[in-house]
């Protein structure tokens, strides 16, 4: 009797795995962000001194939703966002590069 109980106990978790489910259709791709960054439109700010007001102007010129400052020698995540503008600057707070992502 102990052997039957052990077999039932071993088969019970496997029975839960055999439940049939309908296949899930592939999820639709998320829509493009409402505001897509255009770094070309903000290249005129390269060489200027980084300030909060200038950051707002860059954000507006690039058409982005998010602004990310990139100080010198800092680490940044590698995730790509179509609605984000990145502003890199040097030790003198001079903007060296404006990119999207």
Image (spheres, rainbow, N blue to C red):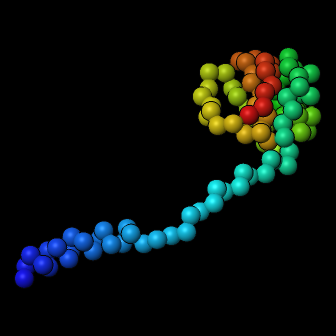
Q: How many marks?
A: 0
- x and y percent of residue 100 in the render? 78, 31
- Tell me: 19 left or right of 44: left
Compared to residue 12, the image places residue 46 above or below, namely: above
Compared to residue 80, the image places residue 16 above or below, namely: below
Q: In this view of the protein, which residue sits in the foreground, 89 or 11?
A: 11
Which residue corresponds to the image point at 84% horizontal and 40% vertical from the top-left? Answer: 36
Q: In this view of the protein, which residue sits in the foreground, 86 or 5?
A: 5
- x and y percent of residue 37 in the render? 84, 36
Compared to residue 36, the image places residue 91 above or below, namely: above
Q: Quadrant of residue 69?
A: top right
Residue 56 visible from this viewpoint: no
Q: Quadrant of residue 48?
A: top right
Residue 20 visible from this viewpoint: yes
As drawn, the residue found furthest toward the bottom would be 1
Which residue corresponds to the image point at 69% horizontal and 36% vertical from the top-left? Answer: 80
- x and y percent of residue 68 in the render? 74, 36
Which residue corresponds to the image point at 77% horizontal and 39% vertical from the top-left? Answer: 82
Q: Quadrant of the C terminus?
A: top right
- Tell me: 48 left or right of 84: right
- x and y percent of residue 60 in the render? 91, 39
Which residue corresponds to the image point at 20% horizontal and 77% vertical from the top-left? Answer: 8
Q: Quadrant of the N terminus?
A: bottom left
Q: Quadrant of residue 11?
A: bottom left
């Amino acid at each position: 009797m102990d052997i039957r109980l052990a077999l039932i106990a071993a088969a019970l978790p496997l029975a839960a795995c055999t439940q049939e489910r309908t296949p899930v259709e592939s999820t639709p791709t998320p829509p493009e962000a409402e505001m897509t960054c255009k770094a070309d439109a903000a290249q005129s700010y390269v060489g200027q001194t980084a300030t909060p007001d200038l950051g707002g102007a860059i954000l507006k010129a690039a058409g982005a939703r998010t602004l990310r400052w990139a100080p010198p020698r800092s680490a940044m995540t590698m995730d790509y966002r179509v609605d984000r503008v990145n502003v890199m600057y040097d030790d003198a707070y001079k903007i060296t590069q404006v990119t999207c992502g």
